[in-house]
Amino acid sequence: MEKRRMKKLNVTTSLLGFGCMRFPLDESGKINRPVSEAMLLDAYRSGVNYFDTAYSYHNSESESFIGDVLAQLPRESYYLATKFPSWMLKKTSDVREIFDIQLSRLKKDYVDFYLIHTLNQGFWEKTLSLGVIEECERLKKEGKIRYLGFSFHDSYEVFEKIIKAYPWDFCQIQLNYMDTEEQAGMKGYELAESLGIPVVVMEPVKGGSLARLPEDVSSVLSAVDPDASPSSWALRWVGSLPNVKVVLSGMSAPEQVRENCSIFERFEPLNDREHDAIQKASEIFRKRIRNGCTGCKYCMPCPAGVNIPENFKIWNEYGMFENIDHTRWSWNEALPADAKPDRCVECGQCEAACPQGLSIIEDLKTLQAEIEKAIR
Ligand code: SF4
Ligand code: SF4
């Protein structure tokens, strides 16, 4: 199993980390414990020593489940990561109260890697004003937290502000070969590296979108290595970055544990030819984008409530990845009905504001018809 050293912390982690948010479920919708336990132990025996959970995963069942499984193993033989639910923060004392609940669910005396979950501009302001970092520092002094970090979902500018504001032990960002300019992106990775802060990566396969490739993309990769799976390309791309110390995979089936472990057991960074192939693949993906919305939000707010950039994001991702399950979820679950295109009253305000000169009104109509047909 490929290992990486976090020089700043004097810690060696397995490059493959087990993300504990997508375990298989039983008929009642709870974690299928026998199968999931076997998956965790299989990964551990293969050398995985980093397990990442959170207060909220699996409707708050994940922490207690992995606490039970890891209790069978020597405590010093693995690293346990969990996260403070920043959206639950109302007052400073919440930090300790929630942390105590987490320790008791995990049945442990300490957490190795503790993250403030899903920091963005709003949660960061609350984190500062309510003294969350100071409270976590007290927990560190008491030996209950070993390393303090944060996971992140917002723009690069917000990432830069957060990472420079405190000497974090580590940080966790979304990164994959198609998200190099999304959120923290490669600029964020490079900034963390320059500050000597180890990086843990989430969504290396872009929520599964890079595991099933359209034919025109997959043919570019298979011309270089016909035996390599799409996921292995994505995982190796992220793992080839030297300051990436853990690549989290939310493994959901025993075969996936096997496949991922075998990729990281014989891990090789991508060579120049392989990097070129990934570059070509991402160019093809980008050509499949439906329109050139950059997400700048100059068109917002729409007086009729349409979430214009979010609609275009769903449409463009559908065009690139043709991931029907993800598109269905984004359209049906993540985008409220009153933010959908059919609320548009064609006032034209957005088109006048759009620096890309997009035909927003027409595009909104086209996308609604196309998405609804695709997910039917
Ligand atoms: S044209 Fe439609 S989408 Fe654009 S601002 Fe007006 S109502 Fe909103
Ligand atoms: S102004 Fe144009 S480019 Fe910017 S988010 Fe709106 S539609 Fe997209």
Image (cartoon, rainbow, N blue to C red):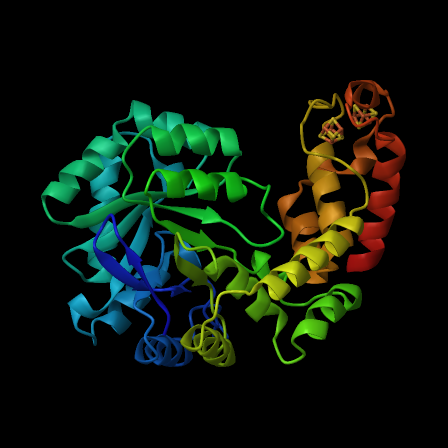
Give x and y (percent) for residue 293: 75, 35
Which quadrant would residue 124 be assigned to in this image?
top left
Name the quadrant of the N terminus.
bottom left
Q: Is residue 36 above or below residue 336?
A: below
**Ligand 2 image position (quadrant):** top right
Question: What residue sits 25% from the left and 38% below the top?
Answer: 95
> Is 75 on the left or on the right of 54, as rendered?
left
> Is 137 on the left or on the right of 52, as rendered?
left
Name the residue at the left extreme.
142
The answer to whether one can see residue 184 in this image is no
Question: What residue sits 20% from the left and 31% below the top?
Answer: 134
The answer to whether one can see residue 9 in this image is yes
Which quadrant would residue 130 be assigned to in this image?
top left
Query: Is 45 in front, or is 54?
Result: 45
Q: How many marks?
A: 0
Q: Is residue 283 above or below residue 163?
A: below
Name the quadrant of the C terminus.
bottom right
